[in-house]
Image: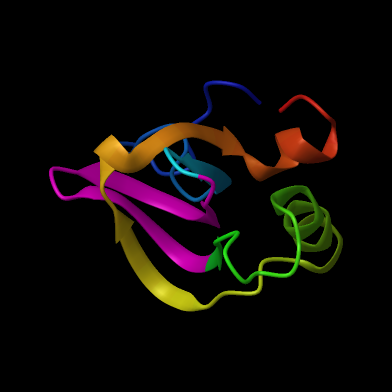
Amino acid sequence: MSGHVFHPGHAELHGVTVVLEMAGEGLYVGRYHEETPAGILLHDVAEHQPAGAGVTREEFLRKTLKFGVRATHKHLVIPTAQVRRISRLVEWESGQS
């Protein structure tokens, strides 16, 4: 349901699995916790960097949607200035992103 916050006092995306598209070609998939002055804090994060990845980001996202987030970082803070866009992972499944 849109606008529902699972934990009152937190941002709408708190606890939601999101895709952070970076200013470059990389992206991160993880559970959104909060945005702080240091950046966006995600938990259980999978990272895709195109250099040497062997798969496109679209293939990476398809596999993530099918098999789940394969976390390579337990917690990660990504500087907000480096993030081009944040979207819910489920939006990629429905083709909205």
**Image position, residue 45 (x, y; %):** 50, 66
- Residue 96's quadrant in the figure? top right
* Image quarter hosting the N terminus: top right
Q: Quadrant of residue 73?
A: bottom left
Q: Which residues are magenta?
A: 25-45
Question: Where residue 92 sits: x, y (%)?
Answer: 75, 38
The residue shown at (71%, 28%) is: 97
x and y percentages locating residue 20 in the rendered image: 50, 44
Left or right: 20 as drawn, with respect to 38: right
Give the residue furthest to the front.
51
The answer to which of 33 and 37 lies nearer the viewer is: 37
* The furthest residue to the left: 37
Locate residue 55 relative to residue 71 in the image: left or right.
right
Image height of 85 relative to 76, above or below: above
Name which residue lies at 49% across and 51% down. 15
Residue pictured at 57% horizontal, 34% vertical: 87
Asked whether residue 34 is drawn in magenta, I would say yes
Secondary structure character of the magenta stretch overall: strand
Question: Which one is in front, 87 or 58?
Answer: 58
Judge whether residue 52 is colored magenta: no
